[in-house]
């Protein structure tokens, strides 16, 4: 798998990947999410490509204190081959190169097994609750 920054031509395949991986939610319009990311540090929005097809994605950012990664996805046909691990490692390297001291991610309560997946890759549960407030409604 080749890892490279997202390009606008990838939009439809990335949205199809997110839909297949069940990452889309009615309150997050994937097109608007992509447009926002293209306007804000798009170099940290990575895709994994195999034989010309987008098979993986990771949308990362650094706010000057913490890095965040969203939309980590590997096409179901390619899962459990180490590609998710490879892509997450690429995100970690890119953030480390910018001096980012810690990478954060959110796991939905509906996917408890994913917590083990991330723990095995060196992520631990913080002693905190993540709170959020919607500023722009997409739905
Ligand atoms: C989560 C996801 C990105 C993992 O990608 P992947 O390429 O299958 O993962 P890898 O092959 O790199 O797996 C690395 C390790 O985690 C394990 N693992 C993979 N998926 C797992 C899961 N769902 N639960 C627990 N462990 C898992 C693998 O067995 C492997 O362990 P090992 O190194 O000890 O053999 C992929 O399953 C996915 O896209 N899921 C749907 C979207 C999603 O939920 N994304 C996360 C949003 S927070």
Image: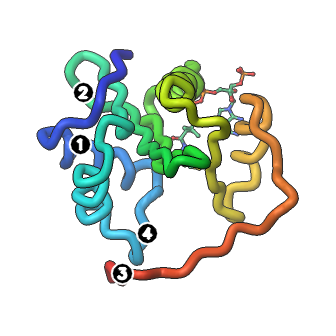
**How far apart are labels 1 and 4 at the CA level?**
17 Å
Mark earlier in primary sequence (1, 2): 1
- Secondary element under disc 3, as helix, strand or loop, is loop
Mark earlier in primary sequence (3, 2): 2
- Secondary element under disc 1, as helix, strand or loop, is helix
User: Disc 1 designates what residue?
Assistant: 13
The quadrant holding residue 24 is: bottom left
Vertical comparison of 30 with 45: above or below: below
Mark earlier in primary sequence (2, 4): 4
Query: Residue 17: x and y, percent?
Result: 35, 45
- Secondary element under disc 2, as helix, strand or loop, is strand
Q: Residues within 10 Å of mark 2 (few under 14, many from 20)?
A: few
**How far apart are labels 1 and 2 at the CA level?**
8 Å
**How far apart are labels 4 and 3 at the CA level?**
15 Å
Q: Looking at mark 1, is its residue's CB closer than 8 Å to ligand 1?
A: no
User: Disc 4 designates what residue?
Assistant: 25
Left or right, residue 129 beside residue 59: right
Circle on res. 53: 2
**How far apart are labels 3 and 2 at the CA level?**
32 Å
Rendered residue at 53%/21% (across/down): 86
Nearest to the observer: residue 16 or residue 30: 30
Query: Would you say the residues marked 1 and 2 are in contact, meaning their CB atoms lie under 8 Å apart?
Result: yes
* Mark 3 or 2, closer to the camera: 3
* Mark 4 or 3, closer to the camera: 3
Mark earlier in primary sequence (1, 3): 1
């Amino acid at each position: 798998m080749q890892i490279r920054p997202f390009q606008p031509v990838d939009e439809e395949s990335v949205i199809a990947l997110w839909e297949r991986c069940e990452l889309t939610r009615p309150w997050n319009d994937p097109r608007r999410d992509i447009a926002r990311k293209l306007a804000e540090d798009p170099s940290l929005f990575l895709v994994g490509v195999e034989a010309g097809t987008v098979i993986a994605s990771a949308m990362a950012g650094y706010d000057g204190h913490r890095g965040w990664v969203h939309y980590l996805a590997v096409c179901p046909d390619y899962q459990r081959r180490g590609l998710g691990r490879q892509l997450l490692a690429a995100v970690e390297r890119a953030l480390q190169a910018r001096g980012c001291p810690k990478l954060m991610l959110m796991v939905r309560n509906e996917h408890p097994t994913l917590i083990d997946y991330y723990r095995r890759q060196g992520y631990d549960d913080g002693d905190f609750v993540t709170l959020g407030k919607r500023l722009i409604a997409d739905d």
